[in-house]
Amino acid sequence: MSTETIEFQAEARQLMQLMIHSIYSNKDVFLRELVSNASDALDKLRLASYTDKDLDVDVSDLHVELVTDAQARTLTVRDNGIGMSREDVVGLIGTIARSGSAEMIAQLRAAKENGGDTSPEASAELIGQFGVGFYSSFMVADRVEMLTRRAGGDAGVRWESAGEGTYTVTDEPDAPQGTTITLHLKPVDAEDGLHDYADDGVVRGLVKRYSDFITWPIRMGEDTVNSRKALWSRPQSDVTAEEYTEFYRHVSHDWQDPLETIRLSAEGTFEYQALLFLPSHPPMDLFMRDARRGVQLYVRRVFIMDDCEALVPEYLRFVKGVVDAADLSLNVSREILQQDRQIQLIRKRLVKKVLSTIRTMMDADAEKYATFWDGMGRAVKEGLLSDGDNRQAILDLCSFAGTHDPEKPTALRDYVDRMPEGQDAIYYATGDSRAALEGSPHMEAFRAKGYEVLLLTDPVDEVWVDMVPEFAGTPLASIAKGDVDLGGDDLDEETKQGFDGLLTWLGETLADEVKEVRLSHRLTTSAACLVGDPGDLTPTLEKMYRAMGQ
Ligand code: ADP
Ligand code: MG
């Protein structure tokens, strides 16, 4: 059979070099990545066997198998899952498509171009943040072989690489269905975190530690090494924090710890269990157009789909985890799910639970909440627009920068508690930056009065403020719109008349620019400022719309 030598895509090459030379200390995690891929491949095959009637495959003994060879110093990870065609191998292994990896490369490149930190330490930090899947095998192996055949496909393929920029692919007609990956291990170097992965005991230990919850059997010789218990169906008190963390890493592709673990379940006519996580940092694609939603759907322990958008609203797309519903068909499609009443009910409860978890965090662990809000707050605020039913609950867990304490954002309820006698609205200003807002003439009268002003600088703030009239009965009001009644002393008629000439002249001179020129109590030291009508677009929104060509 002819062997073809192919170059890795440039980004893939960079990523692999990073893996090979990084000082990422926890090299053991390569096994978690390979087992996770094998488990995904088994999920996909089982699902395909339900949905594709023409696919003639044996799914009676789906499993992962690990084989160590101390003599040859190899470790083999084998699965009889979906496998890959030649095109798959070139497209999936030779190229990086994952947004996390792409983002990581982008950050590295930016660091290089801007003279930033490209040290091995900084790279290791990046790896820890993103994880790099299959390529992590090059942390422990100086050569990787893969033999694979796509389920239903008639030819197999052998892939091989030393991670040096090229790989070879060779047709292999007799390859068994599924994927076999053989790592030719680097010498043991405990100081460098390289353990003896050709040792049975070491490998068993790693499986127990990182992959115990995998629902497929992971076999070594005659034994099944993992307990295979779905975490979400075990009593909460039985599951350790480490087990949750490893499961979180499996579902999220994140290498860090989750910030918060959430469980909920229902019994009776409509039974389901959910195990959800809040991440400790925003997923890389959080603000990209095709950001993925992180909740997987299972039906009675059978994996059905990733990114189940019917289960979580877009503004909670950073939530990761699993929902296992007992009464759905295994054949259920995304379209059917969107209409399904039971799924809608789960979604409702899930949203409430996530919101109440964040709200509780606010009181119980302010530091944790601050970490959460820093990374995910901008996404949560989108819910003020899209989720009318939960608007007040969302408002109640938001925090906003303001003039009260420049270092610390405030919750609205705290703002209201601090309102002095006579103040009857929550005042806010929207704009590009805190500095610009603080320097605005609109602020003067509020400062003089001792009224706090929220300083809203996220683009999404411009949009939601127009849709949210009040918080718990207290109106929200822009300092830059309409008649702000700050209750100053009324000017006497004579003084007012003294300004008539000036106002008329200003009104005529600026006729094309403004609707009206009037006397106001808004200002203390500035002579004039621009005020919008209550229904007007703010300057930033106007800019946004113009930029979008509207
Ligand atoms: P990720 O798992 O996050 O997609 P990886 O680098 O781990 O990223 O794997 C890249 C892709 O290669 C997978 O998405 C999958 O399509 C394919 N792949 C990897 N391992 C296997 C396997 N054992 N069987 C089938 N496909 C696999
Ligand atoms: Mg993977």
Image (cartoon, rainbow, N blue to C red):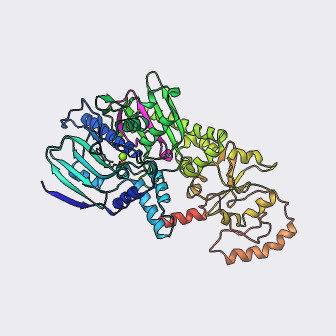
Q: Residue at x 85, y 64 (%)?
A: 491
**Spot occupied by residue 142 in the image (x, y as percentages of width and height):** 32, 54
- Relative to 336, is 408 above or below? below
Q: Residue at x 86, y 69 (%)?
A: 495
Q: Residue furthest left?
A: 1
- Is 304 a magenta residue? yes
Q: Residue at x 72, y 59 (%)?
A: 483
On the picture, is 503 further left or further right than 366? right
Q: Quadrant of residue 355?
A: top right
Q: Nearer the viewer, residue 106 or 453?
A: 106
Q: Residue furthest top?
A: 268
Q: Nearer the viewer, residue 90 or 425?
A: 90
- Relative to 523, is 186 above or below? above
On the picture, is 523 further left or further right than 209? right
**Spot occupied by residue 156 in the image (x, y as percentages of width and height):** 18, 47
- Give the magenta-colored segment's residue range: 302-329
- Is 221 a magenta residue? no
**Spot occupied by residue 329 in the image (x, y as percentages of width and height):** 33, 30
Q: Quadrant of residue 356?
A: top right
**Spot occupied by residue 3 in the image (x, y as percentages of width and height):** 16, 57
| Residue 287 visible, this orientation | no
Q: Residue at x 63, y 63 (%)?
A: 433
- Relative to 511, is 164 above or below? above
Q: Residue furthest front?
A: 71
| Residue 1 visible, this orientation | yes
Q: Nearer the viewer, residue 282 or 467?
A: 282
Q: Nearer the viewer, residue 527 or 18?
A: 18
